[in-house]
Every structure is written in structure tokens, then in C-alpha cells.
Amino acid sequence: MTDPSAAAPGGPPGDADPQHLTVGRLLQERLLRPAVTAASADMLDTAVTWCLPWDEVQAGVDPLPGVVVHARADQIRPELLPGLGRRNATAVVVAGGAGDLPDPPADLPVVHVGAHVSFRHLSQLVAELVLARDTHVLRYGLTVHRSLVELLYRGAGLAALGHQMARLSGCAAAILDPQYRVLAFERSRDRVFEAAAVADALREDACGRAADGASSDRSAAAGPGALAPDQPHAGPQVRTLLIDGISATCVLNPILLGGRHDGWVVIVESADPPSPHDIAQHRVVVEQAATIVGTEMLRLRSVEQAEERARGDFVHALLHGRFSTQHELEARAAHYDFPVGATYGVVVANGLGSVGSPDSPTALFQLAGHAARLDARPNAHTLATVVGDVLAVVRQVDPAGRRDSPDAQDRALADFARALHQELERRTHRRVAVAYGRCVGGAGRILDSYREARIALGIRNRLGMDQVCGFQDLRVFATLVELAESPQGRAFARDMLAPLRGSRAGGSDLEQAVMAYVATGGNLNAAARELHVHRNTMLYKLDRASRLLQLDLREAEHQFAVWLAYKLHLLAETVTAVDRDLSPA
């Protein structure tokens, strides 16, 4: 009977191959000595999982992988042995009759033992050895699990879990994300591998396997049996890789929780060649660590999302002025180390993606994270959040080196807005609209800059402008904001444009013709070319508009009146839409 104490302390049993019980390992037991066989060492390395008697085997036709067949010498018939080989039997143990041992088939080990070895003795021995191995693996797995769970319970983090994996295995250990970026790494004392080199080797190996899988998919039409692309699946994997030109064995396991692949846990074996017993231990370590590391990653992700939501709420409160008192503003700003007395400006952007897409909220918040980290400086705090389909960025203005210029703060904000515009277009691969408000003093006035930025963005989109623009750049609109919001301004724009928009005018063509004529400075031919109409058609529309307006549009004063009414109307619509978004109630 096997001795459990022969196994390595705290680890799987010390067989020739600790992954399974083999025929060779079985023949080392005292019960089977001496044994006679002509089988090679490779044939004796086959796994053993169960034992069946000769009569029962001959009565069936099922495959026999991992099964040792026990037979008495008087039961053996040489012509039946090849059939057992075709059924993938592991070996045939013949009790007694050494002189009558038949010539074994090429694919089936035949072992002759003493007549005292009955089926009961052999089956009991196989069961005890298999259960002993499983017990040792389970015991070691519990030890690994307990040591890692204690760290998880304390919230020690990924670095501590990686360190514990390295301590348990005595080798380098790594935790990688799904793109093989290093999240935690602990070196070994024997063979020092750099974290980046390990990640690069695994990434190249994964790319090679993906390419092989793609080739297999292309060949699938040629017939059955084509291999599927290599996909992360639960369970340890052993790979031999070149790391910095040195051959190394990596034992890795994907981190899979709820069907989501969150990365890999990896152990890089120090010995070359590695011991099978050590590889067996590493497989247990990565298998246990995968779930625990995944749980810690889920916890960290939840904490990070909670912090992001809290930070986003703070930014929303800044943009919409939702602080009840100055003390509340100062208290929440102190939590984020946000100076309330500094100078700030707000930059907004839209056109970042399809709002209806299921992934758009996640993508927008990722862009907000990138915007908050853009052009990081010690004295330039940047906070970003998403308001509907608009990305809003609060930027502390620090015009370093240009304090002598009266417009240094506005120029610094404009530089940041242009840099943000380039970064967003680079990441989204689409045309992005960016605008910004004027700089304001103090965090309590950030809502004013945000409102101006939204107005500038609305005007920019309505006019079809391509460049980044600030509220101050739209000087005419900035001057007319108060007039456009006043009852007198709204009434003037409505009364002036109503004749051109009434049923008698016949739609928007007449208004379009008048505005093109005014925009070209009263040049009839230029306006006709812009609208792609004949000169006489343009002249007819202007005469008709003059009769409806009861104004002579050839006079500059009347052209200015129509232009002013149109601008006030455009600005009033934009301000109304922005105010509705800022204060839905």
C-alpha cells in the first residue's frame, strides 16, 4: 500500500508524473514486485484511473481509457489482446503462468505478476493510489486557497496576491489584463525575468495561436476536423516560451468570472528543465489564484467605479451650481484637493459617438477619463464628466510663462481646447465639435463658463463651423446674448422674420435667399452663385421679400435689420436649448 508521507510536504504526491497515476508508478508498489514486462518506458507512462477484471472487459465493447485489465494466466488468449489495444486499454496484468506469457501487442503493455495478485488486491491498490493523489492535490489546493483568501479578505490588493503566488511557487508570478498588460509582477530569486519581457512573450504566443486558429477556420470548409481558434478557457495551461531569448516554462490560467475574461495569472518556472512535480504544484496555484485574483479585480473595479461616480457627481454639481452653501462647496472641493479660489474654464465636446449604441456610455466615460489626464500639470486640475451626449471638462487655467499678457488665461484655455480636440478625434476617428467658455474666477462661477461653452457649441453646430471656437471668439453673439434673452429682442426677431416664414412666403427658400444676399454684402451675383440659382431668379426673390417686409433690401440699414433679427433668433433658440438642458425643471 502506498505511503502518503512519500509525497512532497504540502504538495501533490511525488510520483514519476504527479499529474496522474501511471503504469510504471503502479509497478513500484510492493504488491506487484517482481513484475515482468517487455513494454517500453513510454508505454508505462500511460495514465491509470481504474481496474476491471478480464471477464467483465470481454463481455463489453466500450472504450477502456485509463483502465488496467486483470486476468489470470488461464484466461488469456493472445488473439484477444489486440482488441483491448484498439479499445485504448492502459495495460493487462496477468497473474501467474510466467512461462505461458504471450507475445504482447505493439500498443498494449502486458505485465506478468505473481499468482498471489488477485483482482481484489489490484483494484484496491489502484483505488488507493488514485484517491491518495487526489487527496494530496486537494489538500495542497486548500492550503493555497486559504493563504490567498486571507489576503483577499484583508483587501491587500493585486501586488500582495502576486507576491503570495511567487512565495508559494518559488518562481516569478504575474497578473496580466486581457491584453497582456502587467497589473502585478513579482520576480524570482533564481532566474530574473523582467515583467515586460514576460508579457511580450505571452502576447506573441497568443498572436501566433490566434493566427493558427484563423488558418484553421479558413481550412474548415475543406472538411471536418479543423481546429477552432484558441480561446481562453477555464483550466491551467502550460506553455514553453522564449523570454529575452531564454527558454522558460509558463503555467497560466485565465481569469474568468461570469463568462467575462479579465486577464491571466501566470507563474514562470525557474528551473530548466522544470520538475513535473513543480509543474503540478504551479497548476494548482494558478487554478486557485485565478478566481481569487478575479474577485479582487472585481472589488477594485467596483471601488474605482464608485469613486468615479462620486467625482462625476461633484463635477455635475460644479457645472450646474447645485451647492446649497459655500461651505458645502468648500468641503466637497477639499475632498478632491480642488482649489475653490483658482481660475477655471469649461471645454465641451459632442459628436463623440452614437448615443443609441449600447457601448456609448462606457466609451464616453472612458473618453472623460482620458480628457481628465490630458496635459497634466502640478497647478492645473482637470475634471471631466459626461452630460447626456456632451463631454464637459473643467480646466484650471495656469498660464505659466505668459502672466504679463492680458489674455494669457484665455489663450491657455484655448490651447487646452485645441489639444483636447486633437486627442478626441484621434481616439474616436470622427469629426468632433469642441467649444469653450470664458475663464471665471472661483469654483462657484464654473456654471457661467459651462453655460457659455454650451452656447458656443450650439452656435458652432448651427453655423457648421469646423474649427474649435470659444464664446469670446463669437464676439457678436457674446454681445447680443442679453438682448436675445430679453422680451424686446425676442419680439423684434419674431416680428421681423415672420413675413418671410409665413404661408405667403412659401417656405424657407425666401429667407435663405435674403440671408445669402445680406451675407454677401448686397452682391446679387455672388448670392445667386452661392445658392446655385439664376440671377433673375434671385432678383425676383429679393423683390418679393421686399414687398413682404415692406423694406427696401437694397439699403444697408434694412439689410442690417434683417441680419440682426436672424442672429437674435438663432441665439435665442440656442440659449433656450442650453437652459433647458442645464435646468430641465
Image (spheres, rainbow, N blue to C red):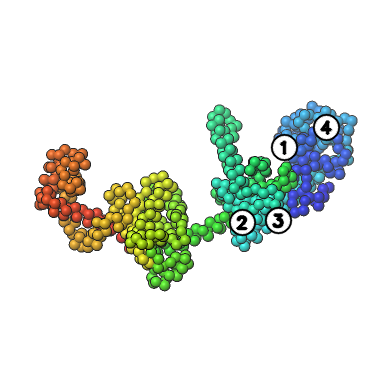
Task: Measuring from the top left, give residue 190's x and y in whole percent.
Answer: 71, 49
Disc nearest the viewer among 1 and 3:
3
Answer few, some or many: residues within 10 Å of disc 2's Cα (few below 14, many 20 plus, some between 14 and 19). some
Provide the residue designation for mark 3.
Answer: 143
Provide the residue designation for mark 2.
Answer: 159
Provide the residue designation for mark 4.
Answer: 38
Disc nearest the viewer among 2 and 4:
2
Mark 1 in CB contact with mark 3 (< 8 angstroms): no
Instruction: Report the residue at 20% width, 59% height from top.
Output: 490
Asked whether residue 96 appears in the rendered view, the answer is yes
Ranked by sequence position, the earlier of labels 1 and 3 is: 1
Ranked by sequence position, the earlier of labels 4 and 3 is: 4
For marks 4 and 1, give the CA distance: 21 Å
Task: Measuring from the top left, give residue 408's x and y in whole percent.
Answer: 36, 59
The numbered mark at residue 65 is 1
332 relative position to 126: left or right: left
Secondary element at tag 1 = loop
